[in-house]
Image (spheres, rainbow, N blue to C red):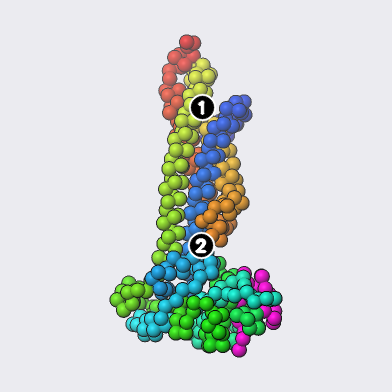
Amino acid sequence: MPSQGSHSILVIAWKTVVRKMFRNVVLAAAVALLVSLLVFALLFNRAVSDDIESASRKLGADIVLVPVEALSKAEEFILESKKKDFYMDRAVFDSVRTLAGVKAATFQIYLETLESGCCSIVEGQVIAFDPTTDFVITPWFKQPPPPLGDSEVYIGSYVYEYLGLINTPTLFNKKVKVVADLEKTGTGLDYGIFMRVEDLNKISSAATGRYQPGMISIIFLKLDDGAELDAVTDAIQKAHPNTGIMTRGTIGADVRATLADFTKVFSITILISSALAVLLAWSTFTALANERRREVGILRAIGAHRGHIMKLFMAEAAIISLIGGLAGIGMGNYLIHHLAGDLNLLSRLGAYASFSLLNVAASVAAMLIGMAVCLVGAAVPVVRLARMEPLDAIKEE
């Protein structure tokens, strides 16, 4: 019986909502805008945060070292795939690789690319690495690649799409052979053209730009299980104070700060939108309560309880807010998936909001918040109406 009563209340509430469609659509639109803003903010935050965490995790290193003045450049290459070249003394690598707690160490050298006619590789960052110590690049091959030989290179996924596996490209005015390509990593490695460090001796100094023998660009350190990250970073800082240190938790610090600013703006906008939605729901249901005082008085006079009146009007508010919430989920997901590419932060990172259970949960949570805001606004006039005595409600002004 209780379920039949609830069903009857929902049917009556739906008919009432449809009867005053225009006014209710305005309230539903306000809820939809609030929910869409919440969905966009939540998915935006998750997309950027997930991209940063994913990029730092995919490098396979616990600590990354670069020249202190190149910290921002290194982050831009790791997170945004921007070509960079910066250098420090290789002695830093020889020193830190033997520190207590360091399980593995490798380095890379970033080089400028010079165009040299037909089939030159210009769409990428040339990276010299040591295959004997590498643990950053090799995990990203679909199958074990052939060892690099003389004038052979590996390429990242973006370069592969641009170039393919051909035998005729040139690099630094020399013909090279592409022998394998990496899977997509979502980091700057996708834009990499990987050559052996020993092949640098075969390239003229004029072709390699600012690079000088005995210099490297970036160091990757993997720690032993149980090694204390802070202890290792402190030791590195004391031994090499002019070296910039990034860890998995600090990679993308500038982007995180920008994200925090975005979050503050979103929060203020959401609070303002919530206040407006509450006021609109309050005014809408105040008008409904005034219009239907006599109807409520008659219902009370023939035996309806205050709880029945509350359920009837709150069911109307729930239906209106549910319609607005569902529309808001659609709008918010459309914005994050189709229009967010115009936002500089997301386009620079290549971040996107993928379909996942967590994102679905975030969308549903945003809808429930929007519905709650609408119900709170509607509750005040509804409670006041339900508490009126039947004769007072029936009595004409």
- Dot 1 alpha-carbon crowd within 10 angstroms: few under 14, some 14 to 19, many 20 or more: some
Residue 264 in sight in this render: yes
Q: Residue 51, labelled with which disc?
A: 2
Q: Looking at the image, which residue sits at the far left?
A: 238
Q: Nearer the viewer, residue 394 or 338?
A: 338
**Residue at 52%, 32% in the rendered image:** 317
The residues tagged by marks 1 and 2 sit, at their Cα atoms, a distance apart of 42 Å
Q: Nearer the viewer, residue 172 or 84?
A: 172
- Where residue 86 appears, as percent x and y from the top left, is 46, 73
**Residue at 54%, 52% in the rendered image:** 343
Q: Is residue 60 magenta?
A: no
Q: Is residue 270 shown left or right of residue 158?
A: left
Q: Which of the two discs, 1 and 2, sits closer to the camera?
A: 2
**Residue at 38%, 81% in the rendered image:** 92
Question: Closer to the N terminus: mark 1 or mark 2?
Answer: 2
Q: As displayed, is residue 387 above or below residue 48?
A: above
Q: As displayed, is residue 181 above or below residue 343?
A: below
Residue indicated by mark 1:
284
Quadrant location, the N terminus? top right
Report the amino acid beneath label 2: Asp
Q: As displayed, is residue 265 above or below residue 216?
A: above
Residue 157 in sight in this render: no
Q: Is residue 121 shown left or right of residue 301?
A: right
Report the amino acid beneath label 1: Thr
Residue span colored magenta = 150-169
- As helix, strand or loop, the secondary structure at mark 2 comes to helix
- As helix, strand or loop, the secondary structure at mark 1 comes to helix
- Where residue 221 appears, as percent x and y from the top left, is 42, 78
